[in-house]
Every structure is written in C-alpha cells, then in structure tokens.
Amino acid sequence: MNGDDGMDEIGQRLAVATDVIRAAGALALGYFQKLDQLTIKSKGLQDMASEADLNTELLIKDSLAKAFPSDAFFGEETGPGAIEGATGVWVVDPIDGTQPFVSGIRTWCISIAYVRGDEIEFGLVYDPCADELFAARRGGQATLNGRPIKPHPGKDFTAGITSVGYSNRVPAATVLHVMDKLLHAGGMFHRSGSGTLSICYVACGRLLGYVEGHMNSWDALAAIAIVRGAGGRTNDFLAGDGLRNGNIIVAGPSQIYDSLEGLLP
C-alpha cells in the first residue's frame, strides 16, 4: 500500500486512489490514442462501451482490492460487489464520456469516489487528455492539480454557461423543459458528453451550474465531493438509495442553486 503510516484511514485511501487514478488515466489514454484498434460495443441507445472501459475499471478494482481488501467496489462495468453492509464502498466510472471517447473527442475522464454510510468521503476526477486532476476530501478544500478552486461568482443565468445533462433514462420532454426555462431566463446551455467533467467545471468556475434529470452514482459522486469542497452546493444525491438507483443532480454556486433547481420539472 502507498499510504503513510501517519495518515488516517481516509487519508491512506485518498493517497492510494490518487496514484491509481493516474495509472488508470495512462492506460485509458493509450487506448484513446489507438481508437482504430479498439473493440466497441453498444449497451443501448447512445450508450457505448469498449475494452478500454472494462480494462481500465479492472486496473482500478484490482489495485484498490489489493490495498484495501475489506472495502466494497461498485463500478459501472463490473457492477456492485457485496456493497450491502460494507464499511466503505469505492464507486468508480472508468471512462465517463465513452461516446466522446470512441468518437475521438477529448471530453472524457475517470472518476473515483469513496463512500462510507451516507457520506462521500472524497472524490477524484482525472482528465488524462488535459492532465487535470480534480480532488476533494470531505471537510477540506477542493483542488485542481493541487491548487484551490471555487465556483463561478455569477448571480443569475446571464453570467455564464449552464451545463444540461441528458440520458434516455428520462423523457426527452424533461430536457426540453430545462432548455426552455434556461433560455427564457437569458442563459446558455452546454453539453460535452461527460457529466462528471462538466460538474468539475462547475466546481472550478468554468461553468455556472449543472442540472440533469437522472445520473448514475458512478458518474456523480466524485464530482459532487469536488463541488462541495470548492464551496458550491448540490442536492442530496444519496437520498432514496441514490447509490444504487441514481438520482437527479443539481450543482452550482450557492447564490444561484435555487434557480438551478427550479429548472427541473
């Protein structure tokens, strides 16, 4: 294990996970640079997976299991492994933004969160293409490549760009409702194909806010930790068994959070 004996249990896990996410990023980036050799499969409408997703998740899963064998693991590709009653659960998306990834677009990332009970203890999101690592521990300051970050100072939708997520798990009318309200309020929308990365952009002030009618926990939890650590606000994503079932997601600066929440039906 790569943890310092002087660290607490959470600090040890954060230190190890930081090394693991960079190693996973290097593996995924290698696949991204050889897309013509990649085996790609459809998991459903606008839902892709490749050997890069699976092998990146297995690298993360095996590395964390070796370091912390008593922890449970919940990954997008391999599913929930004995998470009932587990003291701690790793929640992982090996490549968020697989559709951009397989299309040769650089808006994808790797996400690792660590959850105990009803708390997200820390989150890490790594963008290998930009070599940007977002990180936050509960109660601590969120950082981007080690430097503190904070959300956008804007006070209404005219001040910046709002990211609107969408998946076929919700009716198309839901996202049209959000767009209509946002545009009529003088705002502008953004969608990159990676909700995780977009929420991190909210944390560092590149985007004004993020809303989506449903998001899976492996996409959301690490980025939520980062927004909160940056001083922003999110909904209680884990409510109603959000870990297993997913939930709505609203994230943004405190001063416009209510307006963001009001965009959803």
Image: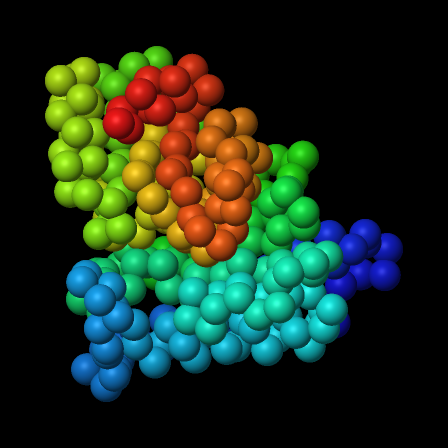
Left or right, residue 11 beside residue 47: right
Q: Is residue 137 above or below residue 236?
A: below
Name the quadrant of the N terminus: bottom right
* Residue occupying image coordinates x 24% and y 77%: 41
Q: Is residue 34 above or below residue 122?
A: below
Left or right, residue 92 beside residue 41: right
Measured as percent of width and height from the top left, residue 249 is found at: 39, 37
Left or right, residue 91 beside residue 128: right
Measured as percent of width and height from the top left, residue 167 is found at: 24, 50
Please tell me how many numbered marks the rendered image carries: 0
* Residue occupying image coordinates x 48% and y 68%: 79
Q: Nearer the viewer, residue 246 or 120?
A: 246
State the image quarter where residue 171 is shown: top left
Measured as percent of width and height from the top left, residue 181 is found at: 18, 22
State the image quarter where residue 131 is shown: bottom left
Tell me the colour scheme of the image: rainbow
Q: Is residue 105 above or below residue 249?
A: below
Measured as percent of width and height from the top left, residue 117 is found at: 67, 47
* Residue occupying image coordinates x 38% and y 64%: 95
Name the quadrant of the C terminus: top left
Q: Is residue 45 visible?
A: yes
Q: Is residue 51 above or below residue 100?
A: below
Q: Is residue 124 visible?
A: no
Instruction: Find the residue positioned furthest to the right.
Output: 6
* Residue occupying image coordinates x 43% and y 79%: 55
